[in-house]
Amino acid sequence: MKSSSREDSSSSTSHRQELRRLLEDPSLFSRIILGFEPYPYQAEFLNDPGKRIIVCSGRQAGKSTSAAVKTIHFAATHSDSTSLIVSATLRQSMLLFEKIAGFIESSILRYSVRRKTRNRIILENGSRIIALPSGSGDTIRGYTADLIVLDEAAFIPEKIIANVVLPMIAATNGYCWLLSTPWDKNHIFYRIWCGEYEGWRRYYWPSRLNPRIGEAFLREQRKLIGEERFLVEYEARFLDDRSSFFPMTLLRRCIQDYEPSIEEGAVYGYDPGGRESLAALVGVKYHPENRRWKVIYWRAERCESYTDFDALIHDIHRRAPMEAIVVDETGIGGPIAEHLRELGLPVVGVVLTEQVKEEIFGRLKLMLERGELILPNDTQLLSHLNCIQYERTWRGGFRFTHRPGTYDDLAYALALALYHRPARSFLL
């Protein structure tokens, strides 16, 4: 009897030790509880106990999956804690939240869920995981958190991070993890990355760290999206934004969370591009209730045949008749505009002289500065805008170029669309 009692006691002690090890080792927790086998660079991040962590990552390096696992471990081991998942838009924060929910629902932890809603999970230990958009700061103001995970932090306005987010963990001495593909250097994400703020652990994850991403795929992406955007999105390099005509500080203010949809009565801009550029189409619609224009459609691709792209435009017009389509008639654009007229589209032709470029980009910038344009949180569209550079001419005007290794076609298409009838937004 005594021998059996000693064996039971020894077994119980062993189980407690294994449980303690499981809870103290997030990478082991990941493998045993969640069924996720991290790569070595992910395991290093998972096991980092630091309260301030920044991850500068390329696409598909696994930052969101790693953050989901680390957030679940935090909630499971910190009773009555509040973990906030925050991004510039609800759609972005929900992507990380859905990864968290997926891990929980497919593991033994599903039995520890007390309540689950669309953007909130409450565990039996009282811990909450909540997904929120940063918006203008109002949607998250007032929360007190033990952990804040800022996903795609480089796209969240700096004043929200500094003035709204970080104060949420002041009273709790909480944790903050910044995760993002990089963008410009005029942002708190870059300054933290460069070490201007003490106490942050830094992780650099270019996409090539992921063993599942092959060299052939990376070569293909470099060709498809351009050298500069490739360096940002796959090599996790920061841009120098100082010479941009549309700096990210300006663009961030105009980003909103919404589902783009083709609408009747919209105005479209069409930049046919050329051999070294893309065919680009952008649609905008004026909303009188808030006196703002909204980007409702965008597409840019390399065209082997403009007939196919014209057919796409004709199909959009057939489904939701356009008010107008403003076409760059410079060079190859002349025959394309004529073809669209033959298809019955309401074409307005524009020849892009240097003076017209100055006018359309100047008008677009003024609308952005005045908050009269709503942009989607789309990397491709933002990069086409952000890459536009300018220099002063001897006459006092502007000459526009774009940074090497970039595409600017969506920027021209958007500027053309707003060139048609933006005057009413200026008059209201």
Image: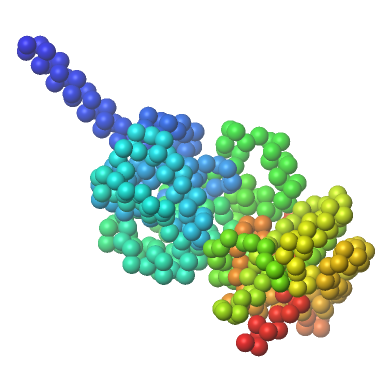
Above-or-below relation of 120 to 139: above
Quadrant of image for the C terminus: bottom right
Coordinates of residue 15 in the picture (x, y in percent): 23, 25
Q: Is residue 183 left or right of residue 279?
A: left
Choose between 182 and 270: the one closer to the eye. 270
In which quarter of the view is residue 299 placed?
bottom right
Coordinates of residue 251 in the picture (x, y in percent): 60, 68
Q: Is residue 311 left or right of residue 68?
A: right
Farthest residue, direction left: 2
Above-or-below relation of 192 to 67: below
In which quarter of the view is residue 289 placed?
bottom right
Farthest residue, direction front: 319
Q: Is residue 54 left or right of residue 389?
A: left
Coordinates of residue 94 in the picture (x, y in percent): 47, 53
Residue 387 seen in render: no
> Residue at point 75% right, 67% down?
321
> Residue at point 77% right, 53% down?
301
Farthest residue, direction bottom: 427
Coordinates of residue 332 in the picture (x, y in percent): 91, 62
